[in-house]
Image (spheres, rainbow, N blue to C red):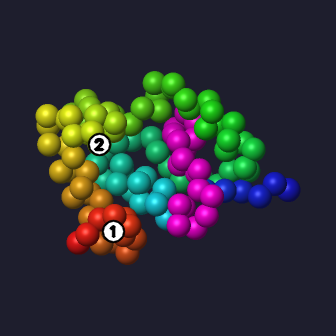
Amino acid sequence: MSPTITCMVNADGHVSAIANGPGIADRIRHDVAVLAECGVPGWTITQLPAAAAVEAMFDSLGCPACRIVFSCGCDIELIAAGGCPHDTAREVYRASQAVSARTGYRLPWVRT
């Protein structure tokens, strides 16, 4: 039996993130919870065999269904770059803080 790894999986079965250790798995769980808190549907945490996870991650490259788009219409890349004119970055930050308060997980670079 192949070992399984923690993955961030889209509803279409494609993988967006693979955890190679417990710290990364915690980060992936945090990210999925933040997306849910912000109303971005379709992302879950799943344990997959390593080979299947890598294959599903390659399948996600360039997949329009795997783009993370918020309700304002901006995607995660634009928001992260500070180009979203809808103040969604503030919403994501607040959601991240709420998830951290519930789970105890702290992003290493965020000061509270």
Relative to 2, say whether 85 is above or below. Answer: above
- Quick one: 4 or 79, which is closer to the camera? 79
Magenta extent = 7-25
Kind of residue at badge 2: Ala
Front-lying residue, 24 or 38: 24
**Residue placed at 46% from the left, 28% from the top?**
65
Image quadrant holding the N terminus, namely bottom right
- For disc 1, the neighbor class at 10 Å (few under 14, some 14 to 19, many from 20) is some
Name, please, the residue furthest toward the right.
1
| Residue denoted by label 1 | 100
Instruction: Name above or below for residue 85 compared with residue 30.
Output: above
- Disc 2 secondary structure class: helix
x then y, percent, for residue 55: 69, 36
Q: Is residue 112 left or right of residue 46?
A: left
Amino acid type, residue under disc 1 in the picture: Ser
The residue nearer to you, when weighing 15 against 71, is 15
Give the number of the mark in front: 2 or 1.
Answer: 2
Could you say which disc has been placed on residue 80 in the image?
Answer: 2
Quadrant of the rendered image containing residue 69: top left
Name the quadrant of the C terminus: bottom left
Q: Local crowd at mark 2 within 10 Å, few (<14), some, or many (≥20)?
A: few
Q: Is residue 63 above or below residue 89?
A: above
- Horizontal placement of 2 versus 67: left or right? right
Q: Which residue is drawn at 20% across and 50% down?
A: 91
